[in-house]
Amino acid sequence: QKEVEQDPGPLSVPEGAIVSLNCTYSNSAFQYFMWYRQYSRKGPELLMYTYSSGNKEDGRFTAQVDKSSKYISLFIRDSQPSDSATYLCAMNRDDKIIFGKGTRLHILP
Amino acid sequence: NAGVTQTPKFQVLKTGQSMTLQCAQDMNHNSMYWYRQDPGMGLRLIYYSASEGTTDKGEVPNGYNVSRLNKREFSLRLESAAPSQTSVYFCASSTIPGNTEAFFGQGTRLTVV
């Protein structure tokens, strides 16, 4: 079992819909939980991070962590075509950042 | 505002050739990383350097070597390229090892024929 599991998609939703992206993990040692966004042919960029169970909101984005279930989510409200990208969950352990496979998201105008 | 700079952006190699991918950051970060990204596989860590003078293996180190030349530069070398090393390579840096925010370069697209 990989340490971080993420459905690669693709996921297509209409503009304005709420998007839910998810990851599961197996290692209780992970401390921080991150979401990176990667546009086509670009490097990933940090979108949000959190370290405790619960919700963290930033504009249209909400990151949720459930440590008891080893499950994290990213919600995007009022999705826009500009949100079309690959979203990678990531977690840190020791000196490393471990990434999920990424979910390709398409927002349809 | 250069951030993390990778060279070259594109490269085609023949099987058995060698090459070095260069990476430099201007943010005074301590830690640097090399990842490869393949379709359906996500970002996989090849090697990392937690601080100047140290390097460690990541998830997929076979066939690669690295050098942390100084605090700014971290190079990745393929001694004898194989088609399985066809990938997009990303260099990243962070202030401290495993920090939440890693800054990525624009990637090097490598094809081995």
Image: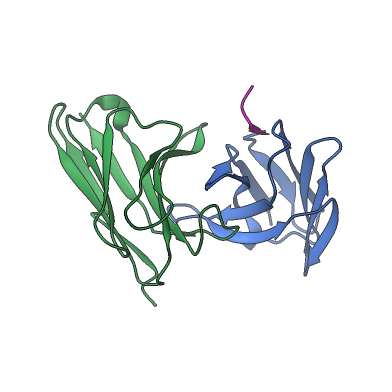
Chain colours: A blue, B green
Query: Which x, y percent locates residue B104?
Result: 44, 58
Magenta residue span: A1-6
> Which residue sits at x=22%, y=41%?
B77
Viewed as shown, does residue B37 lie left or right of B85?
right
Q: In front: B70, or A76?
A: B70
**Quadrant where the N terminus of chain B is found in the figure:** bottom left
* Snapshot quadrant of residue B81: top left
- Asked whether residue A79 is drawn in magenta, I would say no
Query: Which x, y percent locates residue A42?
Result: 44, 56
**Quadrant where the C terminus of chain B is found in the figure:** top left
Q: In front: B40, or B103?
A: B103
Query: Which x, y percent locates residue B12?
Result: 19, 40
* Snapshot quadrant of residue B5: bottom left
Query: Which x, y percent locates residue B27?
Result: 41, 72
> Which residue sits at x=77%, y=44%?
A72
**Which residue is situated farthest in the top direction here?**
A1
In the rendered view, tell whether residue B59 sits above or below residue B76. Answer: above
Viewed as shown, does residue A69 lie left or right of A27?
right
In the rendered view, tell whether residue A24 sits above or below residue B98. Answer: above
> Which residue sits at x=36%, y=52%?
B107
Count of numbered circles on the image? 0
Q: In front: B71, or B82?
A: B71
* Snapshot quadrant of residue A79: bottom right
**Which residue is situated farthest in the bottom direction here?**
B1
> Which residue sits at x=14%, y=36%?
B18
Viewed as shown, does residue A46 lie left or right of B4?
right
